[in-house]
Image (cartoon, rainbow, N blue to C red):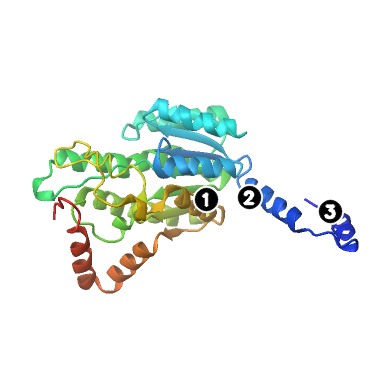
């Protein structure tokens, strides 16, 4: 950062400050979350992994949580290679004891928590008529209860730092998504939980940000469960036309820094949410028509 005297010197001798200003902007970006402790569930891939890199680049110390230790270690190694600081905690958010251990290990290692990003999630693709009920349980346990467990154990620490809870919901938490009944239900539930959590803790300084991504290029459709609960393996949609996970992470970091309360991402997602809120019957026809175009559509 240039002092007033240094800036005066450059102006006096007509030396361009453009390069210095650019450098200062980079420094400012790197310091946005300096020494903040950020927990990210589902950090081994997709939006979670992209958030890990983005927040680390902004100076945060990252706690990486997911089930796949090998993938977590890769993310940790990448962060450390760039001068960052990261801790890995193998976590299955469906298990209460794993979520408690995640928070306990974070406090043991870093002594505090500033941001909890509830990103761990799984999708599905099948008509409800053909769906095995175990798939609904799997989605609710991961997408909804996984966030509930983590928030429950992290909340006392977040209140101490007046920190932030971030929940990665979906446009499917604002509007129906045919062929994804369990997924949409879990995201609607997550929205209700987080929005109420915000009100309960508003006077205590807790910020709650609910993020509603549209279709994002990640592996969530590859791992989406079919009617029997098996990963479908191949995505039915054109991933190249979707917003990248890196862009989503960049927007999330900026909104977290500004302590915003709600994000709706992609132009298509914003339009779908707005139309469904104002013209639900008309929007139902549009959504159903769009989803029926998928290869081997279940609707």
Label placed on residue 85? none
Q: Is residue 277 above or below residue 79?
A: below
Q: Is residue 113 above or below residue 20?
A: above
Percent position of residue 26, x then y = 66, 50
Percent position of residue 124, x then y = 22, 45
Nearest to the observer: residue 5 or residue 117: 5
Label placed on residue 29? 2
Percent position of residue 147, x then y = 37, 42
Q: Which residue is mark 3?
A: 3
Nearest to the observer: residue 4 or residue 188: 4
User: How dense is the environment of label 1, judged by Cα within 10 Å: few (below 14), some, or many (20 and up)?
Assistant: some
As drawn, which residue projects farthest toward the left?
129
Q: Is residue 13 above or below residue 81?
A: below
User: How dense is the environment of label 3, judged by Cα within 10 Å: few (below 14), some, or many (20 and up)?
Assistant: few
Answer with the quarter of the image where residue 210 lies.
bottom left
Left or right placement of residue 60 versus residue 171 in this view: right
Q: Which residue is mark 1?
A: 253
Left or right placement of residue 114 versus residue 12 in this view: left
């Amino acid at each position: 950062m240039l002092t007033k005297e240094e800036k005066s010197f450059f102006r006096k001798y007509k030396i361009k400050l453009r390069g210095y200003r650019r450098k200062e902007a980079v420094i400012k970006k790197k310091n946005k979350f300096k020494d903040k402790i950020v927990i990210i569930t589902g950090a081994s891939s997709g939006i979670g992994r992209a958030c890990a890199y983005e927040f680390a680049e902004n100076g945060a110390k990252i706690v990486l949580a997911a089930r796949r230790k090998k993938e977590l270690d890769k993310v940790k190694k990448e962060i450390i290679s760039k001068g960052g600081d990261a801790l890995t905690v193998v976590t299955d958010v469906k298990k209460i004891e794993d979520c408690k251990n995640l928070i306990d290990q974070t406090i043991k290692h870093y002594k505090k928590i500033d941001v909890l990003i509830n990103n761990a999630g799984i999708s599905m693709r099948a008509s409800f008529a053909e769906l095995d009920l175990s798939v609904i349980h799997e989605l609710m346990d991961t997408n909804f209860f996984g966030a509930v467990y983590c928030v429950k154990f992290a909340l006392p620490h977040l209140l101490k730092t007046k920190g932030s809870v971030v929940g990665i919901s979906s446009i499917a938490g604002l509007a129906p998504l045919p062929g994804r009944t369990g997924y949409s239900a879990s995201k609607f539930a997550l929205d209700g939980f987080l929005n109420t959590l915000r009100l309960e803790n508003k006077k205590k300084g807790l910020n709650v940000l609910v993020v509603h991504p549209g279709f994002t290029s990640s592996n969530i459709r590859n791992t989406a469960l079919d009617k029997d609960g098996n990963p479908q393996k191949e995505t039915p949609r054109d991933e190249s036309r979707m917003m990248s996970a890196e862009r989503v992470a960049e927007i999330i970091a900026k909104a977290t820094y500004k302590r915003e309360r709600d994000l709706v991402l992609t132009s298509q997602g914003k339009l779908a949410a707005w139309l469904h809120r104002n013209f639900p019957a008309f929007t139902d026809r549009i959504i159903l028509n769009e989803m029926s175009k998928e290869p081997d559509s279940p609707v």
